[in-house]
Amino acid sequence: MDCQRHLFDMPMDVAYLDCAFMSPLMGQVLAAGRSGLARKAQPWKLGPDDFFADAALLRALMARLMHARAEDFALIPSVSYGLAVAAQNLPVPQGKHILVLAQQFPSNVYIWRDKARRCHGAVKTVSRRPGQSWSEAIVPAIGPQTAIVAVPQVHWIDGGLVDLAAVGAAARRHGAALVLDLTQSLGALPFDAAAVDADFTVAACYKWLLGPYSTGFLHVAERHHQGQPLEQCWHNREAAKDFAALTEYRDALAPGAARYDAGESSNFALLPAVKAALAQILDWGVEAISATCAEHTAHLAAAARACGLEAEGERLRAPHYLSLTLPESAPDDMLQRLRARNVFVSRRGNRLRVTPHVWVNDADIERFGAALKSVIAA
């Protein structure tokens, strides 16, 4: 892809290489959010359909993005919300374990610790050896005692890639449920929901989906469409569009995954912004985004190598992720020094996380290399 920097409000002297932390908003996404918020200024123009129309469009867009069905999506405000839905609807027999990765993102660990305590089960943490892929570590760890496998597609610290088709197949062989967090991959890596066949899949929008904070999606396999939602909302009931009959209280929940929608999910400001972001991602094509990011990370890895920093090989990491192992001599204020040179990345433990997107240009890569050399040599 050509550089898409013109779609973002990003000064030319800023090298923003931190999409894994938070993406900037494109101009059209910001405009859509402002326009949506303005609707609330004149509520007399709103009707029952306005509470459901944007949600229906978003479910359709996500179906295209994940090669899934629109009725399999719920609208949620956060990853933790979606994982709580999954935990509520998946059993863990006494003595069985829930499998997670070492240094997995906290939201995808705390919920399972709580679930294990309540069910008298255990959390099993999988680590990987140097040179070993996460998939090679996970698959042998899944066995008859595994109740749930809860993993990401891309590890948020080291950028390690997980072969979800292989992990899903192993989970099904042993009767284990599969719960996925795609927050660090969806929108930047292709994903086929049918091929992976996870039970529950969550993704927040504010990173690689280029959307606003407090928005996300929960994909629910059809086999769980009769489960229990976290909240008892008016809008996730059958016939909720009939405002005149809302006090004809109904026990029947909405069909499909809509029963799991969070309260006030028809957010007039945020949903149009999400819609604009997803439409642009689909227009670009995830394969093109992934290839562009891979090209950027290759050049950034070369710049880092010239400074003595190494990243894992392409076989082990996601193409949009670069995780550089820092020497013990790396200064504690390394991020501040890079920021002073208008280079923005993240540090997680002893790793420098560099995650570019389609706004990156050659000048950004040169700025990164020069700033890194200056900081490491200091």
Image (cartoon, rainbow, N blue to C red):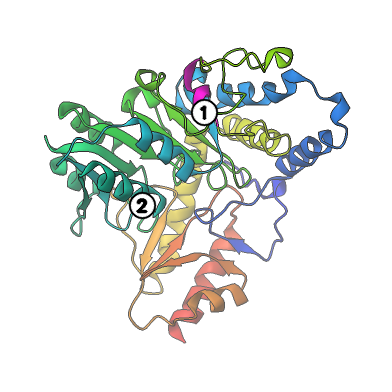
**Residue nearest the viewer, comparing 268 with 164:** 268
**Nearer to the camera, 250 or 188:** 250
Residue 279 appears in the rendering: yes
Looking at the picture, how far across and down is residue 280, in whole percent? Answer: 63, 34
Who comes first in sequence, dot 2 or dot 1?
1
Name the quadrant of the N terminus. top right
Location of residue 340 by image quarter: bottom right
Residue range corresponding to the magenta coloring: 255-261
Majority secondary structure of the magenta segment?
Answer: helix
Q: Is residue 104 left or right of residue 6?
A: left
Other-residue count near label 1 (Cα within 10 Å), few / some / many at <14 / 14–19 / ≥20? many
- The Cα–Cα distance between marks 2 and 1, rounded to whole angstroms, is 22 Å
Relative to 341, residue 232 above or below = above
15 inside magenta stretch:
no
User: Residue 278, percent across and down?
Assistant: 60, 33
Residue located 44% across and 82% down the image: 331
Residue 63 seen by the camera: no
Instruction: Place residue 343 in its image quadrant.
Output: bottom right
Q: Which residue is identified by label 2?
A: 110
Under mark 1, the amino acid is: Ala
Q: Residue at x 18, y 48 (%)?
A: 137
Q: Nearer the viewer, residue 90 or 62?
A: 90
Element under label 1? strand
Q: Which mark is residue 143?
A: none
Q: Label 2's element?
A: helix
